[in-house]
Image (cartoon, grey):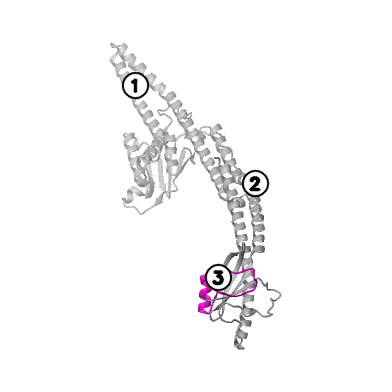
Amino acid sequence: MSFRRRVALLAAAAVAIAVVLASALTYLLVAHQLRGQIDSQLRDRSHGVSAYVGRRAAEGLTPFLGGDAIARNPLGNLLPRPYQVRGYQQFVNASGGVLFRSSANVTLPVSAATRALAARGGGSRFEEAHVGGVRMRILAEAVLPGVAAEFAQPLTETDHLLRHLRLILALIALGGIALAALLGRLVADAVVAPVGRLTRAAEHVARTRDLSGRIATGGPEEVGHADEIGRLAVSFNAMLDALERSMNALDASVHAQRQLVADASHELRTPVTSLRTNIEILQQAPHIDPLQREELFAEVVDQIEELTLLVNDLIDLARGEEPPAETEDVRLDEIVAEAVERARRHAGGVGSDNPLRAELAPVVLPGVPSRLGRAVNNLIDNAVKYSPPGATVEIVLERGQLTVRDHGPGISAEDLPHIFDRFYRGAEARGRPGSGLGLAIVRQVVEQHGGSILAEAAPGGGTLMRVRLPRAQDVAADRPPAARYGATV
């Protein structure tokens, strides 16, 4: 059964039940009201008779002779009032004998409860009985010691009225059920319409993979007061937005991976070809001059080192697509100091020709120490590589910012926007060793740690690399002052 049909049936059933219950309640209320009117008339009649009989008894006039014989009409000339009906009256004793009845043709039944009233001499009760095929409402009430009066009123008109009322209410209920079915269909259409829009939107996405479609939810004020369906539409649109962003990010990631593979294959082809050529020469020329052999071996070693560095850089770039490792509080000034010391050792005595001056304030940064160390090493190695002999490389770390300045030829305006791209090498770098991945790795690591990097021309010549790390915090240091403030390493 479809959702629309279930909603229609539930709505129709709810309205139909309400109509039937209202009809039944109306019938019960009307029947109770009519029964109450008859009971009031009987009680009013009994009060008049009881008062009349009581007065005659007080005057010493006994309205009844002994036995069951009726002396005379104990009601005298007592007439009903305008709002009373005469009906039927009857007097009985405690044994159930009839002492008087108002109609010679109608004898009211005497129940055990009525006899008990007469014997007890007090109280009253209502009951119903059929007399001559007519249903009557009877009030039994004790009027004298040992005597009870019965007042009866036919229910013929009341039953006739109730039968008509039942017919009318049955027709109303049937009409209400039919109307409920129609209203249920209309309600189902109104309720299911928003769900239908959601269904069509979901089917469209599943069929076409198009995530650009959205469901209209009204203005911001309407959305704030939306019902469950409206909130569902808002949530569906939010889900489509998140899914679209994820798909775009996935497409960008796939494109970046393909570009990385294409660039890597291009960069790997040259050293691998050159390495293979040199090895083939060594293999095919066993009697080559020893000096040339040594030169070829040295060239093969250099090519292997270049290839190793390139592979390591590619691995670092590939790791950038992985989820970040667990971070810890890292002393960035210690990492920079270790990188400076490493650059000095790697220069192999060139430290006097290219002094490295570091001014490092104590800074703590939440991050991954290995990746931060690789980025700082690349940054300092790049500055040393492009600095002329005797030029100082200046490294400053303070207030969450790391700057590295060299005094080399600088970067041309055409190359400046691209120096952080993968495998990009400017005009000044094409004649130098390297893969063009060092600064790309620096930018990747810095962005992973919530920062940014900017390259700009330094005053007086050279290049200034400026790394901003908003998450870094200055802290009290426990390092020796010479290592923290303006030490030349």
Amino acid type indicated by mark 1: Glu
**Looking at the image, is mark 2 or mark 3 earlier in the sequence?**
3
Instruction: Give the residue pinned by disc 1.
Output: 299
Quarter of the image where one finds residue 445: top left
Question: Which numbered circle lies on residue 182?
Answer: 2
> Quarter holding the C terminus?
top left
The residue shown at (65%, 63%) is: 156
> Quarter holding the N terminus?
top right
- Asked if 427 appears above or below 220 in the picture, the reply is above
The secondary structure type at the circle numbered 3 is: loop
- Asked if 32 appears above or below 122 in the picture, the reply is above
In the displayed structure image, the side of residue 348 where residue 171 appears, left or right: right
Query: Depth-wise, is mark 2 or mark 3 nearer the camera?
Result: 3
Amino acid type indicated by mark 3: Val
Can I make out residue 353 in this image?
Answer: yes
**Looking at the image, is mark 1 or mark 3 earlier in the sequence?**
3
Q: Nearer the viewer, residue 142 or 254?
A: 142
Instruction: Give the residue pinned by disc 3.
Output: 110
Magenta stretch: includes residue 486: no
- Asked whether the residues under the numbered discs 2 and 1 touch, taking CB atoms below 8 Å apart as contact, a structural biologist would say no
